[in-house]
Structures are given as structure tokens and as C-alpha cells.
Amino acid sequence: MNISTDAPVLVTGASGYVAGWLVKELLEAGLTVHAAVRNPGNTAGLDHLTSIAGSAPGKIRFFKTDLLDEGSYAEAMRECSVVFHTASPFTVNVRNPKKELIDPAVKGTRNVLETAIKTPSVERVVVTSSCAAMYTDAMDCRVAPGGVLTEDVWNTTASLSYQPYSYSKTLAEREAWKIAASQDRFRLVTVNPSLVIGPALSKKPTSESFNIIRQMGDGTMKQGAPKLGIGAVDVRDLAKAHLAAGFLEKAEGRHIVSGHNTNLLELGKSLIEKYGDRYPIPRKSLPKWIVWAVGPIVGGIPRKFVRNNVDVKWKADNSKSKRVLGVTYRPLQRSMEDMFEQMIEAGVFRN
């Protein structure tokens, strides 16, 4: 990959789980990274990035930005050739989905891309979308052409009241393509990952992914885990996919970045070999009828979600990411073990 280091690049939400590994890749390639964050004064929350910059050939500069503050990315974007827009809320438990998910995702995307139109140096924008912009439930895979998600499929089943996170990713990506079509200054490329797993660069990771895996070690799933159909991708493979999307000439359009068609139980079982004797890792399938009965009471899980995802296979075609972006996917077990080990070291499972 021929990466020019002449111009800086912008990474929004630079302190995030996925963005951290992307910043590492960029710094190690010798680039100057303009890291857009909400609070550049929060040195503790940015330590992992400054320490990488200390030993890498690239340089990092921090800029204060806000997804909802129009024009707040202008200074950070000045002279940048590529913009990586990774900033978007990823949380499941929300009280006000429009305020907490939809507005930051859609307005933030509009804010970043409209700034890019006004910034003469920007040649490409890479938006971190999601497979959630293609599906809401694993059941949606069944009705996709050939029973498999592809880059041609769009999510049509999420709403403000049902799976608002998926709805936010769908609306934000549609907004990105609409804005991109209205101009000819930059090329838009999207990266659409499934559930992101693997270690974080920050010592105390807070991503929703870690909340899910935590339940596999703290006893929540000791009676079993549901075979809830999902895809999974290692955060380090995803970072390399972003790098390729930003700098490969042939990169265009959407890219499903997902290493494994799997389910929640299989994620858990991948930890048994190394950790099964010390932690209450789920070993068996939790029957659908039990999840159906207790899900709404214990976990606030809607019965519609149980019906459409538990014991339903999730399938996506990742061939474009391998062919165009050159992504190679590491084994699921390695990703899960590296992630779980970090959580042990961080004291997540201490009683």
C-alpha cells in the first residue's frame, strides 16, 4: 500500500476502541494524525495514544470537537487529505434514542462531511458504519438475496422504537452517501463491521463489546448462553481495513468487515480451553423458550428480538473486504482470548 505521509489525516472520536488501533496504524505508517476528541485536556483518557506516538515515526495533535457543534471540525480537518469518521455512540441501553443515538450519529456525520466539502485538501472520507446498517435481526439474513448479507443490502426493519442503535447507523450511512453524491471534492468509502472483539489499547475499555464479553466471565451466563446469531471481527483487523479504505486507489463503496459468522454461545465456548477451569464460561446453549420467558424480565430483551435472533444463523459475505481491502481475518479464539486476558488484567472479574 502506497501511503503518502505529506499531508496529515483526521480521525474523529480518536479515543475510541476502534479508533485507537487505527491511530496506531497511522502513526506507525509515519503519518501526522489530527485526533479529534471531546476533551483534549483529559490526559488520562488519551495516555494510550500519546504513548504510541512517543515510539512511532508519526506525530499526533489533539483537537477539541463535538459531533453536534456545527463547524467544530474545521480546524482539525485543515490540510488533511483523508478523514476517518469513527465517532458515533454505541450503546444499547438508552432512555432517549433520538437524543442519545440518532442525533449524534446523523448530525455528526452531516457535520463532518459538510466540513469536508469546504476543506480543499480532503480527497477521501472513510466512514465507520456497521453491518447494523444492513440488518436489525439475524432473521433479516434469511430474507436477503441468497440468505446472505452483502454490500447491496440495506436495513429496512429497525426504527426509533425497535433497535434504535441499528436505526442510527442506517440513517447516518444513508446521510453520508446522500452528501457524497451532492459533491465531487472527495470520494466516500464506508467500512461496515459486525460485532467488534479483541483487546483495547486503553487500559480500561468501555465499549459495549466488553459489556457482552464480561457476562461470560462474571457468572451471568454460567447456566448457558443463547445461540444468538451475530458476526464478529477483531478490532486489529478492522483497523487495517480502515487504513486500506483510506489509501488504496481501488477502494470504493461499502465493505462488510466481519471475520466470522457465529453466535453468542460460540464466542463463549472459544474461551473454555484457556479459561474454563477458572471462570464460569458458558458451555451449553440456553434454550430459546427460557430466553423468551425470562429475557424481558431479567435483561429487558424484547420477545421480538428473541424470536428473530436466538437459534437463527447470521450470515454475511466478507469477500469484498478480502479482495479489495486485502483484509485477512485472525481466528476467533485468538481474538476472544486476547480480549478476555486484558479484562482479567484490568480487574473486571474481581469479586
Image (cartoon, grey):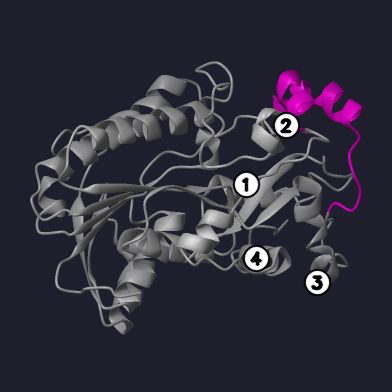
Q: Left or right? Give the position of 117 relative to 262.
A: left
Q: Is residue 9 magenta?
A: no
Q: Residues within 10 Å of mark 3 (few under 14, many from 20)?
A: few
Numbered mark located on residue 113 in the image? none
Q: Is residue 295 magenta?
A: yes
**Residue 244 seen in this snapshot:** yes
SS at badge 1: helix
C-alpha distance separating marks 3 and 1: 20 Å
Mark 4, residue position: 335
> Residue 142 shows which numbered tag?
2
Badge 1, how many Cα within 10 Å: few under 14, some, many 20+? few
Which percent across, then down, holds residue 339? 63, 64
Q: Nearer the viewer, residue 337 or 221?
A: 337
If you read the primary sequence from the N terminus, does the residue marked by circle 3 or circle 1 appear first? 1
* Mark 4 vs mark 2: in front: 2
Residue 250's image quarter? Answer: bottom left
Q: Observer-nearest residue: 282 or 228?
A: 228
Q: Nearer the viewer, residue 278 or 161?
A: 161
- CB atoms of marks 2 and 3 within 8 Å: no
- Residue at the spot x=72%, y=48% of the render? 215
**Segment colored magenta:** 282-309
Q: Which residue is mark 1?
A: 211
Q: Which residue is mark 3?
A: 274
Task: Give the crowd class for mark 2: few <14, some 14-19, many >=20 residues within 10 Å.
Answer: some
Tell me the element at label 2.
Answer: helix
